[in-house]
Image (cartoon, rainbow, N blue to C red):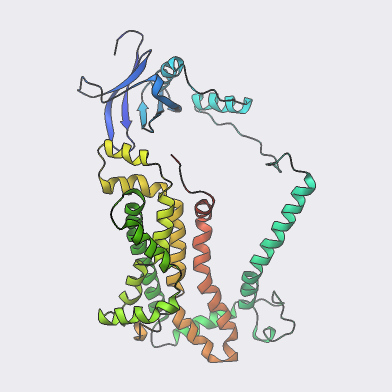
Amino acid sequence: MSEQNTVKSIGTMKTISGRKYRGTLVAGETGAAFYEKGKDAPLVEWKYTRLHRLDNIRRGGTSSQVTVILKDDSRYIFDLDYGLKVYNQMDKNWADKPVTTKTRGDELHRLAELRGEKIQVKKHLITRRHPNRSIAGDIGIYLLLILMGLAMAFPLIFQIGASLKPLDEFFRFPPPVWPAHPTTDNFADLFVTMGQSWVPFSRYLVNTIFITFAGTFGHLIIASMAAFVLAKYQFPGGRAFFAVVTTCLMFSGYVTGIPNYLIMSRLGMIDTYWALILPAFAAPIGLFLMKQFMEGLPTALIEAATIDGASTFGVFWHIVMPNVKPAWLTMIIFSVQSLWNNSAATVIYSEAKKTLVYALGQIQAGGIARTGQVAAAQVIITAVPIIIFTLSESRILETMASSGIKD
């Protein structure tokens, strides 16, 4: 590259595979190149005609971050001492950059980023996403959504209210949704009852947490690796194997209960934690979900990482898994719900190895006097899946709304 009309800056370059290089970025009138420290030949070089997108974020002082995305999906992130100068040089000579309409707010944001400032944006109380729809239409849709939301939330509200009812309010007719005199005695009595068992309550809880964590983690890793191979590699029998997985989705746990018991018995895993953990690894829902989502990832993204020197496992762990985060969060929800609510009464016989759901279920045998404790136990059992879903709700909904990045 000619030394005339060029702008240089020392910094680091990060590739799509996560590798970092220290060197100098040189931007000229026709293109730019990055020279690794101590090397004469450019490590990366491109003409401005190959550019697809340029971004610049000021770090503070004269340093800033410049992101370069080429038309072949190659991506390079530069942390430069004089990044703004290099960015302006490339942007000035990038003749065929796409024209985008900008509002006054967009321009204010751009100038604020260059100065390292933030702009406070005033948000309107109501934002019209569909200006071609009448206000009456908006009101009707919101009323329908509110009614559907109340119908879905009613069972949960009723369950929580039941756990707070004193015993005399359980048998009123019609049953009140919310107790007239709320009390937490049901929860206190539940822990007292569990504490009187010869196996401590904490033991049931530890058993459930261990089974749920181990089964979910193994399911996530095995299903993700298998889905990656099925989605991005062609091999004999791949379609037939996925067809078998899809067929397995039709069978419920009641149908597979006896074959599962026979297999675990032959393996000598009855009355062990593995009788629950191992079958969880092979649950077909996770493989199906991950494979369908990974098919939406652009192959060019994986090929670019491979060209940069990333191994197959490196591509899977550093490129694929972060991009399918909504899918594996959804899979975690399904796995946790299945394992947490599994009483394991058919494969685990030792009291010290039984789960929390089984122990809480035994309280129901106590008759009418333990009705309040049963309601409290149901709230505890239901709470864990709901909390996990609430914490990861936005990511999980992405799985249902999209199928990932498209080529």
Residue 218 at x, y percent in the picture: 33, 63
Q: Determine the image quadrant of residue 185.
A: bottom right
The residue positioned 35% from the left and 67% from the top of the image is 282
Q: As displayed, is residue 390 above or below residue 35?
A: below
The residue positioned 32% from the left and 26% from the top of the image is 11
Residue 228 at x, y percent in the picture: 34, 52
- Judge from the rendering whether residue 229 lies leftward or rightward of residue 155; answer left or right: left
The residue positioned 40% from the left and 20% from the top of the image is 49
Q: Determine the image quadrant of residue 99.
A: top right
The residue positioned 52% from the left and 73% from the top of the image is 380
Q: Nearer the viewer, residue 106 or 346?
A: 346
Q: As displayed, is residue 227 above or below residue 339?
A: above
Residue 13 at x, y percent in the picture: 32, 30
Q: Determine the image quadrant of residue 280.
A: bottom left
| On-image quarter of the N terminus | top left
Residue 117 at x, y percent in the picture: 53, 29
Does the image show residue 351? Answer: yes
Does the image show residue 356? Answer: no
Q: Nearer the viewer, residue 11 or 296?
A: 296
Tally of marks: 0
